[in-house]
Image (cartoon, rainbow, N blue to C red):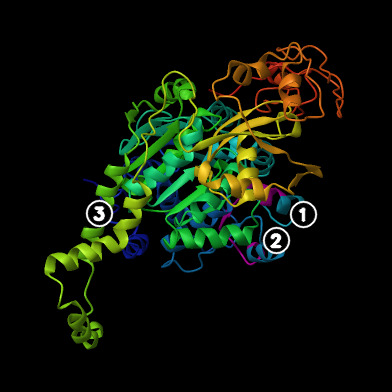
Amino acid sequence: MNTFETLGIDGKILSAIKDMGFENPMPIQEKAIPELLKNDSDYICLAQTGTGKTAAFGLPLAQLIDFKSPKAQAIVLCPTRELCMQITGDITNFTKNISGANIVAVYGGASIEGQVNQIKRGAQIIVATPGRMVDIINRKKVDLSEIQWAVLDEADEMLNMGFKEDLDVILSKTSAEKHTWLFSATMAQGVADIARNYMSNAKEISVGKKNQGAENISHIYYVVHARDKYLALKRIADYNPDIYGIIFCRTKIETQMVADHLIKDGYSADCIHGDLSQAQRDSVMKKYRSKTIQMLVATDVAARGIDVDDVTHVINYSLPDEAENYTHRSGRTARAGKSGVSIVITNMKELGKIRFIERIIGKKFIEAKIPTGKEICERQLFSLIDKSINTPINEKEIEPYLPKIFGQLEHLSKEDIIKRLISTEFNRFLEYYKNSNDLAGDRSHSASHSGGNFKRMFISLGRLDGVDKGQLLNILCTGADLTSTSIGRIDLMNSYSFFEVDNKDLEKLKSAFAEHDFKGRKIKIEESEKPADSKRERYGDRDNRGGGEKREFRKFGGDRGGYGGKRDGSGRGSYGGGGDRKSSGGSDRGGDRGSYSGGGESREGGAGSRRDKFAKGSRPRKKF
C-alpha cells in the first residue's frame, strides 16, 4: 500500500498531514497526486463526492506553489461558501509549516472589502465561489495574469448552479500557459464542454466508472402512497435511533414544511434552503456539525458543498429533477471510505425514475418494506438497552445520591427495576405504534383511508387559487395546529378540494377555520357526504367538459361556475354562470408544470406545451 511519502509529498507537508490524522492515501489521492506533481498537463479527475478530492489537488498545490512570492499563482473555484471555507481550511492546514503561505477564501455573504485587502497583502492561492470572484474582477482588484494552476472543484455542480458565464469570465483572465485541473463527481455534458474549451490534451484520472455512485453506499427504496410519505419518513427515523442524516426535498416550501413537522413531532431536526439568511444557514450548520440536531432537511442547492463526516443516511423525500443530482445527494454519506445508506421514499408512478438512476450510477436499488410498529418498538427497545449498557458511570458524582436511590428502590425486585426504567422511554413508542397500520404502497392506485378514523371533508380552495397538495396540507396543518399525520388523502380539484382528517381532530379543524381566510377570501370547510371513491368526485374534475365541477361545487354553496377548458390545454377556458374570476387562456393542464412547460406557472395561461422548453433546439439535460 502506498503512503503519502511514496507518492512524493515533501517533509513539511507530510508533518502537517500527519498532525491532521491522515495515514494512508485514498484511491483518488493515490492516483492523482503523483500525476499532478509532474506538472506537465491538464487533468480531468473523476471521483464520487466525499472521496478525498480536496487533498488530491490541495497537497500537490501546497508543494508546487512558490510561497516566497506574494503573487497569486493558483485559483480554486468551487460552487458554495461552505465548500470554499472547507477547502481553504484544508490547504491552510497542509501548509502550516511553510513560511509565508497565505490562502484566502473569497465568497459571497461576507465583506468584499476585507477579502480584497487579504488578496492585496499577498495570496498565493485564492479559493473562490464564481460569483464573488467575478465581482472582484469587475472592480479590478485582483490580477490573475500569473495564475499557473486553475482548479475547478465540483465542476458539474457549478454548471448545474448556472455559473458557466462566471467561469468563462474568470478563466479568460488567467494565463494561457496555466495548467487546469478539473475535479467532478459526474462527467456531464457541460463538464465535457469546459474540458474542450479550456483544457489542452487533458489526461483523465478516474476512480470507478463515470457518474457511478460510491461502492460503499447501499441504495434502498420504499414504495408508499403519496399521502403517507411523511409517516414513512418518521418510521425510517424511528427504526434507526442513531440516525445522523440529510433529508432532501425538491422545493423550499416542502423543505420548511417537513422540518417544521419533524420538530413539532419531537425529532431533532432543522432545515436549510434558499430563503434563509447566511447567518441562519451558519447557525443551522453549526448545530448539525456538532450533532446537536440529527436530521437536516435541505434542498439540492442549499446542500451543495456540505462536507460533514459520519452522515449515516441520505433520505430522498422527493427525487431530484435531474438524475445526476442523485449522485451528489447520495455522496453526502459514506465519506472518507465509510459506509452509508441512501434511501428513496417513492410511489408506483416514480418507479421508472428509480430504474433510470440505476443505469446512471451502475448500482441496483433494493426494495424494502416500511418497518411495522412492532419492528420499530423492538429496535428502539434494544437500542435503549445498548445505550444503558454503554453509558459511562461517574462513580464520584453519583455516589452521594446512591443511598437515597437504593432506599427508594429497595421494595422492587431487580426485574421490576429493569422493566420500569426501560418503560420510561419505551412506553411512548408502544403507545404511538399501538394501532399502527402497514404503510406499504398500493400497487394499483392511491387509495383513501376510506372510513375508519378519518372523515372526508370539502374545502373551497383548489388549483385555481394557486395551491398544490403540499401547500394545501400546509394551510390545513398550520391553520388548525395539526401535524400532517392528522390529514389523509387530498384530492385537489380546480375550484375546490376534498381531504380526509382524523376524527379526533375534526372539531379542532372546524373551529380553527370558522373565521379563517385565504388572500382575503373566506375559506369554507364542510363535511362531505360522498364516499371517497365516488367516480364523479375522483374523475369529474379531470374531464372538465360540461361544467362537472360546477355541479359539485354548487352542492356546497359555491359561487363559481364550471371550468370549460379542453383537457389538452389548447382551448380557451371559461367560468360558467356566476363565476367571480375570468380566464385568459386554456385549462390549467398547459401551464402548471413549471419544470416542463414554456407556458410559465400561470394556471390561467395555457399557451405552453411540455415541449416548449426545448423548442429552440437546446439539448435537455438527463431528466426523468
At label 1, which amino acid type do we have? Arg
To which quarter of the image does residue 112 belong? bottom right
Q: Are marks 1 and 2 in contact (CB under 8 Å)?
A: yes
Q: Is residue 129 magenta?
A: yes
Please, what secondary structure does the residue beneath circle 3 have? helix
Q: Quadrant of the N terminus?
A: top left
Q: Which mark is residue 348?
A: none
Give neighbour class at mark 1: few <14, some 14-19, many 20+ (Cα, 10 Å).
few
Residue located 74% across and 41% down the image: 523
At label 3, which amino acid type do we have? Leu
162 relative position to 378: left or right: right
Residue located 83% across and 21% down the image: 575
Q: Going from the N terminus, do you reach mark 1 or mark 2 first?
A: 2
Q: Which residues are magenta?
A: 119-134
Q: Which residue is the site of mark 1?
A: 139
The reply to whether residue 570 is visible in this rendering is: yes
Q: Which residue is the site of mark 2?
A: 112
Q: Is residue 447 magenta?
A: no
Q: Going from the N terminus, do you reach mark 3 or mark 2 first?
A: 2
